[in-house]
């Protein structure tokens, strides 16, 4: 008798993990059942989120960090949230290639997930995936996103530590931090630190951080040249420090509690929205309602009320 | 007998419009009723969305554009979506002040709305507000957001034309456009065009646009110095051109149809989520469920199923 998917995943089988993630990504009931089965074995991995504008070198940095963690014999998994693009240049594909040196290492698991196709359920699929990676015995789970879009913010929010990766020239991100539009991360990296404007950038970031309310943890700024591995050891050290800090303060469990609550709410909202969309598509009366809205005879709010009423009656057998 | 709020709003009464927007912002049933009453009188205004990183000078540009439109005797309304910030510097407040020269002009109506407080309903409140401005007889409705966060993207999506405002140094935005993370707008402005790197910036944008699929409309790049009014006439001309183009192509009604559909869906989803959150807060059994999730005894998906079941039974009297 063959071992079940869950048993193989818990034993660290790479193919079982890959299969499980595909099930979760496809919103297959078997995927949810798998997460349910392995869930009691989660909560051990250090989950680190990496965010920052495209082109900042996040993948190269993660590649270098993987090398560092592997030297310490830690098992690593990476989930890259890949922005779906109507016209993709080579940039993001190139990023994938930068991680390829680790593809053959059995202690490293790399997966990417497209924002398109997940249909509003991206954050949920990503978080279920992180749980599966955790259950499969990975010591480090790295989540990579570009910091745009609510779904991606939701993903990053679920990390124990958040790293913002910038480069000299990331003026828009600095402005967003300054204006409070972007949240202050736990660690800031200035990558491509061989650029002559690096120190100007570091000064600007210091200026922004000095305006932020202090919550005990002082956000470190780490200069890296990820392509040459420079500064990566310091980054690893700062991440370990941050983790020790949140564990000691009890904020780790607080943070995880808040994140799990929002995950439950997120899954529930996603399911409600899907049920609603399905009922919209199939129901000719709903289509007529929408025609009335377009003709300005029925207002959107009244249409929403009617849509909800019909959807509810359709779902209460 | 006094005129009703709707009658006064339709007659262009500024105080009635302000009152109506407050009702919508507070999610007051009277606000929804008001929109319902005036909805048949909407659809006439040209709705233009302005997005771009903080500090790009959007408010100054809008101020200059208002002056231009007022000289043509057009009535203008502005809705600024104000990112809620845990530590706000002077930057955004300064932006508000830049519009202050228009505060006393009866042909100009300016309002800002905070992202925080709208509790997930920001996009809906903003769109209802735009409808009220339209019904009050405004010829131009300008929506201003920083281009971060799904709610803000949703707001901008509802404009007939979208203007992306950049400045020399907006490297992150260029990268986001290039990677397809940010959607291509209808008009791109390079503001603060007295900066020596302006032409480099324009060349970079041209490079990105040349990679984008062409859909008939060629995205113009307009150089402005909003603080001195330079380039504003050209911007107004390009906006008029874009509007004529979408009207001629029939894409305006297509765009509005799509936007109205997503608004109906958005309002419905918001209501479902609110009902769910309300049931979470009050129900001790739900709180116990969540404790089980935190203790890793119950997985988030099963918890969501249980939450939905309880919420449904609570809402079907």
Image (cartoon, coloured by chain):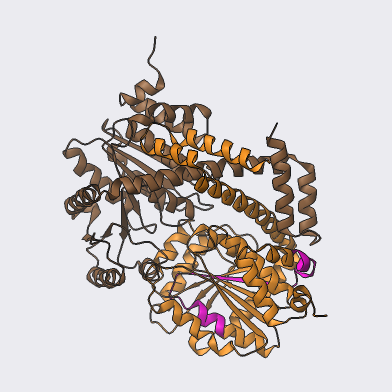
Chain colours: A brown, B orange
Is A241 in front, or is A97? Answer: A241
Q: Is residue A239 left or right of residue B237?
A: left
Residue A34 in picture, x, y percent from top left? 44, 27
Q: Quadrant of residue A70?
A: top left
Identify the residue at horizontal 72%, vertical 66% (top origin). B35
Q: Measured along the vertical axis of the image, is residue B289 above or below residue A308?
A: above
Residue B45 part of the magenta segment: yes
Q: Is residue B21 left or right of residue A31?
A: right
Q: Quadrant of residue A230?
A: bottom left
Identify the residue at horizontal 65%, vertical 51% (top origin). B268
Q: Measured along the vertical axis of the image, is residue A296 above or below residue B8?
A: above
Is B229 in front, or is B195? Answer: B229
Residue B72 seen in the figure: yes
Residue A290 in picture, x, y percent from top left? 76, 52
Identify the residue at horizontal 26%, vertical 48% (top origin). A250
Residue A166 in picture, x, y percent from top left? 32, 61
Q: Measured along the vertical axis of the image, is residue B238 above or below residue A117?
A: below
Residue A64 part of the magenta segment: no
Identify the residue at horizontal 72%, vertical 82% (top origin). B13
Is B295 in front, or is A68? Answer: B295
Q: Measured along the vertical axis of the image, is residue A30 above or below residue B63?
A: above
Residue at far right of view:
B1
Q: Which residues are magenta?
A: B36-63
């Amino acid at each position: 008798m063959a071992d079940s998917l869950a048993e193989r995943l818990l034993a660290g089988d790479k193919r079982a993990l890959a299969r499980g993630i595909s099930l979760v990504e496809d919103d297959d009931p078997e995927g949810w059942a798998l997460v349910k089965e392995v869930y009691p074995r989660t909560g051990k991995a250090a989950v680190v989120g990496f965010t920052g504008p495209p082109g900042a070198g996040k993948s190269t940095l993660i590649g270098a960090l993987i090398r560092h963690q592997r030297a310490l014999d830690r098992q690593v998994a990476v989930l890259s949230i890949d922005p779906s693009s109507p016209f993709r240049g080579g940039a993001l594909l190139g990023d994938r290639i930068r991680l390829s040196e680790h593809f053959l290492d059995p202690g490293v698991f790399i997966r990417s997930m497209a924002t398109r196709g997940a249909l509003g359920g991206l954050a949920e699929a990503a978080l279920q995936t992180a749980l599966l990676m955790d259950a499969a015995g990975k010591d480090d789970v790295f989540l990579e996103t570009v910091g745009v879009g609510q779904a991606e913010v939701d993903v990053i929010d679920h990390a124990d530590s958040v790293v913002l990766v910038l480069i000299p020239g990331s003026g828009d991100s600095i402005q967003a931090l300054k204006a409070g539009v972007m949240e202050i991360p736990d660690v800031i990296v200035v990558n491509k630190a061989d650029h002559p404007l690096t120190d100007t950038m570091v000064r600007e970031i210091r200026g922004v951080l000095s305006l932020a309310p202090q919550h005990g943890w002082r956000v470190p700024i780490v200069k890296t040249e990820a392509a040459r591995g420079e500064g990566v050891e310091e980054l690893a050290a700062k991440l370990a420090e941050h983790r020790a800090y949140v564990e000691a303060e009890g904020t780790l469990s607080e943070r995880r509690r808040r994140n799990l609550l929002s995950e439950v709410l997120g899954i529930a909202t996603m399911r409600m929205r899907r049920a609603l969309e399905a009922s919209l598509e199939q129901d000719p009366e709903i289509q007529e309602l929408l025609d009335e809205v377009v003709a300005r005879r029925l207002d959107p709010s009244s249409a929403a009320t009617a849509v909800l009423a019909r959807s509810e009656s359709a779902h209460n057998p």
